[in-house]
Image (cartoon, rainbow, N blue to C red):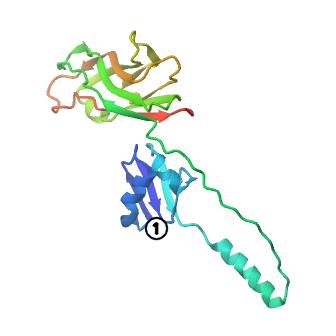
């Protein structure tokens, strides 16, 4: 969830993965956010031209605020005082403006859901999980930097009704002919509901498959609410370096 605030308006919203520009447009009317209000992400100012490119993440704090004009009023008061008292105030300045002609690019990477594996879950049973692909991560053709894949188990509060123990082994593999593993092997469980696998792309070939490669479970007696045995996994891809 993302904390969004303007003046006395405040809300926790599901904006993870969306841009600051999307958040501004969504809350512009509801919060009365003016066009000139500056965005601050986790206390860091973000220029409006960067808002469409800046993605929000879970636990981020996004604030909109109008720039203070106190400094301008203070300078004006000084100039007025000098004029009244006959003080001489002379200044000279040279100014110039430059436009940085930058190249807009697509998102550095995309993620899509695969056709996940399936298996029967019996009550009062110890069993193993079925391996299979969960997600496919496809970097932009011009992106060669490091990445991090974050997986979150979003319904552990339901899974505890069906399982005593649930362990999902997660790995990432590239698309070379021999399929090379990238990054480390991590374990997603009800007690460890979020894992992160960081990797660089040197020596590997995109796209990358996020795979369920193994694991096991122990269930309670049958009779839990239908679908509470189904793990729900959220995937987020983050930038870890420059291209």
Q: Residue 132: x, y in percent?
A: 29, 18
Residue 138 in sight from this viewpoint: yes
Residue at left 44%, top 65%? 33
Residues 118 and 144: in front is 144
Classify 242 as above or below 212: below
Residue at left 18%, top 31%? 227
Question: Circle 1 is placed at which residue position?
Answer: 34
Residue at left 37%, top 66%? 29
Classify 199 as above or below 103: above
Q: Residue 169: x, y in percent?
A: 37, 18
* Image-based side of 72 in relation to 171, left or right: right
Query: Total number of numbered labels?
Result: 1
Q: Residue 55: x, y in percent?
A: 45, 45
Residues 211 and 121: in front is 211
Residue 160 in sight from this viewpoint: no
Classify 63 as above or below 153: below
> Circle 1 sits in a helix, a strand or a loop, which is it?
loop
Residue at left 51%, top 54%? 49
* Image-based side of 242 in relation to 122, left or right: right
Q: Residue 18: x, y in percent?
A: 40, 47
């Amino acid at each position: 969830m993302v904390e969004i605030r303007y003046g006395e308006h405040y809300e926790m919203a599901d904006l993870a993965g969306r841009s600051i520009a999307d958040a501004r447009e969504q809350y512009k009317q509801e919060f009365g956010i003016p066009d000139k209000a500056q965005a601050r992400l986790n206390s860091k100012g973000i220029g409006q031209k960067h808002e469409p490119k800046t993605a929000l993440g879970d636990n981020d704090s996004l604030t909109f605020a109008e720039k203070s004009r106190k400094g301008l009023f203070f300078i004006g008061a000084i100039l007025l005082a000098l004029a009244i008292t006959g003080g001489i105030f002379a200044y000279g300045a040279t100014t110039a403006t430059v436009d940085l002609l930058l190249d807009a690019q697509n998102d550095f990477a995309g993620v899509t859901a695969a056709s996940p594996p399936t298996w029967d879950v019996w009550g009062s049973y110890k069993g193993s999980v079925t391996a299979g692909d969960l997600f496919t991560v496809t970097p932009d053709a011009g992106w060669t930097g490091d990445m991090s894949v974050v997986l979150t188990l979003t319904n552990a509060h339901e899974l505890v009704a069906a399982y005593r123990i649930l362990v999902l082994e997660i790995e990432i593999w590239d698309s070379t002919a021999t399929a090379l593993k990238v990054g480390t092997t991590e374990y997603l469980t009800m007690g460890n509901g979020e894992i992160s696998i960081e990797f660089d792309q040197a020596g590997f070939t995109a796209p990358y498959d996020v795979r369920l490669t193994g694991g096991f479970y122990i269930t309670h007696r049958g009779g839990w609410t239908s679908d509470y045995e189904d793990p729900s996994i959220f995937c987020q891809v983050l930038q870890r370096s420059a291209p």
